[in-house]
Image (cartoon, rainbow, N blue to C red):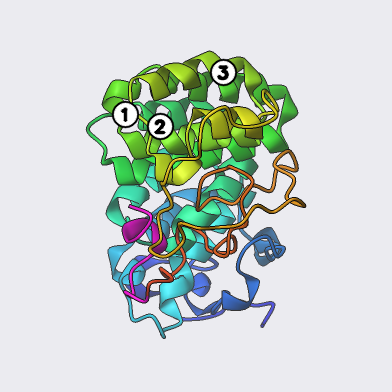
Amino acid sequence: MSDSLKTSAPKGYVEPVAGLLGYGSVESRLGETPWPNYLELGFADEHVPDLIRMAMDGNFNSADGDSVEVWGPLHAWRTLAQLRAVEAVEPLLQLLENLPCDEWLSGELPKVFSLIGPAAIPVLADFINDNDVDEGSRISVPSCLERIAQDHPECRDECIGKLASQLTLHETNGSELNAFIIWSLIELKATGAINNIRTAYSADCVELGIVGDVEDVEIAMGLRQGRDTPRPKYNIIPGLDDLELDAGQDLDSGNIPRNIPLNGVTNPLRHVGRNDPCPCGSGKKFKKCCLQ
């Protein structure tokens, strides 16, 4: 990969922003692999408006999957993150609505917003609270607040407070959003939110196929040792109704699978993320297929 991003300047983009369109695929760097230092390429605050424009550019976001240009928006939002561009938070959240099936977007936004920092928290809270936004877009927000809380310990209570407060609106959130909120509260070991969680379950407003029932949550949070009732049949993939107990699984490790109930069972799909291809072979993303 060249240190220089010299290329033509399509659609009015100027260097170094235009050069991101030739920066190339990052498929080998999926997940937490360190990002390049984009700021070494000459980016500064003056480039933020064009970077936002590129991140939102429908021509590139919908480009051929084998093209180089399709990766331009991803490099743009990563650069915005490294510039700590607070003004990019709202547009990038809008992108969740524009690109509901973009696995890279939903997968990278938690890190993007965490790098931007605590100033993103109120914008995220407003977005998750907006009932005019599709639930499928809003379910990406809890993991963003979760990541900020983990990376900025001084903001942990604020992030937990936003999540717990949103859960009080369980009747209008949607059952899947409630489940993902609870999921992040589990990851943050937010035991103080347990009454909000119990209330949401009592109102039958939580999708059991995502986080399990209230006893599963209490076990995962260390608030109970085992179940008092038989485990319900709420596995979400056909043929997984008879999973065996995994005595070695540590539900307090923070590495809780995000696919099936948190009940101490072996999960053969524990490596399947909600944005991964569905194991049923439909060709759809897990969250758009059997996870529903």
Residue 285 showing in the rendered view: yes
Q: Specify which label sits upstream in the sequence, 2 or 3.
A: 2
Residue 284, placed above or below residue 88: below
Residue 129: image location, x then y, percent: 35, 26
Q: Residue at x 59, y 31 (%)?
A: 227
The amino acid type of the residue labelled 3 equals Ala
Q: Residue shown at 50%/53% (left/top)? A: 259
Dot 1 amino acid type: Asn
Q: Is residue 183 above or below residue 129?
A: below
* Residue located beneath label 1 in the image: 173
For label 3, the residue is 193
First in residue order: circle 1 vs circle 2: 1
Tell me if residue 11 is in the magenta stretch: no
Chief SS of the magenta region: loop
Kind of residue indicated by mark 2: Asn
Instruction: Write the start and end of the magenta stretch as one range.
Output: 281-292
Question: Which residue is identified by label 2?
Answer: 178
In three-dimensional space, the C-alpha distance between marks 2 and 3, rounded to whole angstroms, equals 13 Å
Q: Nearer the viewer, residue 253 or 37?
A: 253
Mark 1 and mark 2 in contact? Answer it, CB < 8 Å: yes
- In the image: residue 61, left or right of residue 111: left
Percent across and percent down for residue 261 are: 51, 45
